[in-house]
Image (tube, rainbow, N blue to C red):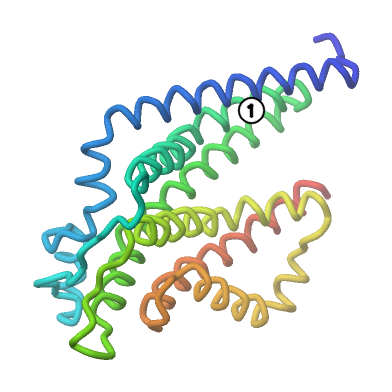
Amino acid sequence: MKEMNFFEHIEELRWHIVRSVAFLLVVTILIFIFSKFIFEDVIFGPLDVNFWSYKVLCKIAKDFCVTEIPVKLINTEIAGQFFLHIKTAFMLGVMASVPYFLWEVWLFILPALHKSERNYAQVLLGFGFLLFLLGSAFGYFIIFPITLIFLTGYTVSNDIVNMPNISNYFENLSDTVLWTGIMFELPIIAYFLSKMGVLTTDFMHTYRKHLYVAILVAAAAITPSPDMFSQIMVAIPLFILFEISVLVVARAQKSEN
């Protein structure tokens, strides 16, 4: 294959970006058009007492048995629902386009990789996408419902009625799902940091306790509620992902020797 100069690489990158943006726009428009299911069954799903997560959590602990979610969403702006529609379609469009984005990344870096590196990178990209999906699902089905139960059930006075703005509800939901998905990318991030020489197994072993504390802080930042249970629910899979990251870094270092 002909070796490209700097400007040819830039031109190639530009077309990858153009195709990615075009794909994102198409997916966003489709989600905007067919949004009834997305809003009623997905976004507002955790507001239904028959939501799947509540049934499962109720079997684990009776404190999570939900008979009522005392929340009534309101809109305080004339164009609020319209802009929420656009924002929701765009964010979901980004998440739905992740596989295509990864495919474009793969096509861009493919010519620079050796055969053995291609196989490894392909597995890495697929694993990274799978981790993001698992993290997002964990945030949506576990973390956000627990947070919602805690916050809507917390009262300082019976005279106060919970009527959050619809934008506030969506921001809490999207932030929880997105950041949980990103945090699940820990092994992939660790791999690239090890390749850059920033992260080593010696460092991870030496500062394991400190890194565990950092994970707890990150878990507290991800969960919008202050209850300890939801933070622990986030921290446990992150601890597991950290240990997987240690193995990934060790494997990456071994392959370089």
Residue 142 is left or right of residue 96, and the answer is left
Name the residue at 77% across, 61% down.
199
Q: How many marks?
A: 1
Q: Position of residue 240 (x, y in %)?
A: 50, 67
Query: Label 1 belongs to which residue?
Result: 106
Q: Looking at the image, which is closer to me, 232 or 249?
A: 232
Relative placement, left or right, of 187 versus 199 is: left
Q: Is residue 23 left or right of residue 156?
A: right
Q: Which residue lies at the image location 54% right of the left edge and 77% below the top edge?
A: 216
Q: Looking at the figure, which quarter contains the N terminus?
A: top right
Snapshot quadrant of residue 112: top right
Give how far across and how far down residue 32 sits, in percent: 34, 31
Dot 1 lies on which element?
Answer: helix
Is residue 241 left or right of 136 when viewed as pictured? right
Residue at 46% across / 58% down in the picture? 175
Residue 171 to residue 25: above or below: below
